[in-house]
Image (spheres, helix red, strand yellow):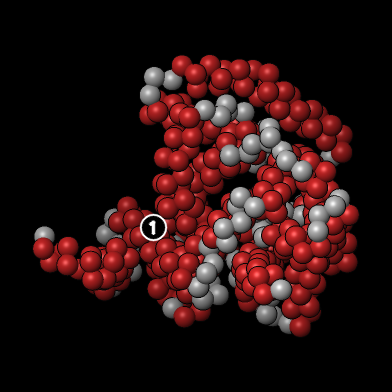
Amino acid sequence: MSQLRTGIRKHGWLGVATGATVFAAAVVWWFGMGKGTHEPAEPITHFLLAVAAILLVCHLCGALLRRLGQPAVLGEIIGGLLLGPSVFGLMAPDARAWLFPAHILAALDAAAQLGLIIFLFLLGCELRLGAIRRKRVVTATVLGGTGLPFLAGVGVALLAGSALAGEGPTVTHVLFLGLALSITALPVLARILVDLRMDRRDVGVIALTSAAIGDGVTWLALAVIMAMAGTGDSARLLPRLGLALAFLLVMLLCVRPVLAVLVARARSDQALMAGLVIGAVAVAALSQQIDLHPIIGAFLFGTLIPRTDAMTRVSEQLQGFTITVLLPLFFAGVGLKASFGLVGGDLGSWLLFALVLFAAMASKIVGAGGAARLAGLPPREALQLGTLMNCRGITELVVATVGLQAGLINEYGFTVLVLVAVITSAMTGLVMRRLERTGSQS
């Protein structure tokens, strides 16, 4: 025990985790590939080793990015990309094929979907719009920060033609790309503001409020697009939209009062947590059954839960496991689907990627910052606000994954949106620190 404590003090928990994972990998490889069978002894052993490798890479990258002044979640996203075909697959294709065979990928994807559902449920729980300050500036920021990027995305989709499109109807692809460029990632934005100590400043509060409203609009718009994409027959579109509207009304009129009673009468935090997780997963399943994505139902379920002290404690308990264990599995799933080779194939692919990135950044900064300036925000704060709203992070990855699954974009389009999410999120922190230094010197 004394040696274990000494090792932990000397190398840290990540060092111990690294050593344990390497040792486990060596043992499994010896009893699997090392003896020529090319398969581990037990499927559960293979699955657990894959999970351990994903968590290790994502959290090591998160720790590294934190030391570089970036949010840890950005490093975890990059860690997921490193496990994909463009890095791990290029450096050690046989090892990647052994670690992530088809049946392991299917199991990881199922676990990642559960993590995504819980994450969106928690995100809905955090959506508080009851006490909006600076309503005029917030309204202008939301309208400009979503409207102009949406139009830019629609223009890019029309200009690109079939280069980014999936197998779905053209109109839904165009609307989807507009939606994808209009996103701001609330979770990553919140972390950046805390790191910069701007979460309580006026511009930080405006950014968080605008991003929260934008998230609500995003999932509502995505629900409509998914309903449209569910059928290529226009005669079935109105019934499908009607079913989605009925689902929304039932949630508001029936489920919301039941949730209020459940939260008020819960005997313990554990009972409340169990009831809410069961409810979120059940509503997500119902959402999937009516051809909406499960995350839409989970997010809506979260927004209907009353804000109480008990609910705050439950949310904090769920966040720890979800963010530490389940979300890295989703990031790895994104990395395993994204292939940078699709972008680097020819000059035209790079030019189209550059166009999408420029349209996403310029339209968000000009739209959000310009609208806030017209609403009365000082020029420097308006520029800061536009820069903050350009952060896309996790939300972009979620929406891109939904679009790929629904056939609204192809694998090249998915990779482009993933790169846009990573680049805009990384640039937000860097540019904001530069603006803060410039402001303090003037």
Q: Residue at x 32, y 52 (%)?
A: 44
Q: Which image quarter: residue 423? A: bottom right
Q: Nearer the viewer, residue 222 or 35?
A: 222
Residue nearer the viewer, 146 or 55: 146
The residue that disc 1 covers is 51
Where is residue 284? Give x, y as percent: 58, 35
| 160 left or right, relative to 406 | right
Q: Considering depth in this image, is 404 or 382 the residue closer to the camera? A: 382
Image location (x, y in percent) of residue 161: 85, 65
Q: Is 212 left, or right, of 29 in this rendering?
A: right
Quarter where residue 260 is shown = top right
Can you name the residue that lies furthest to the front here?
442
List x then y, in percent, for residue 408.
74, 54
Residue drawn at the location 85% of the way across and 52% of the way down: 376
Figure quadrant of the N terminus: bottom left
In the figure, 437 relative to 117: above or below?
Answer: below
Q: Is residue 309 something that shows in the picture?
A: yes
Which quadrant is the C terminus positioned in? bottom right
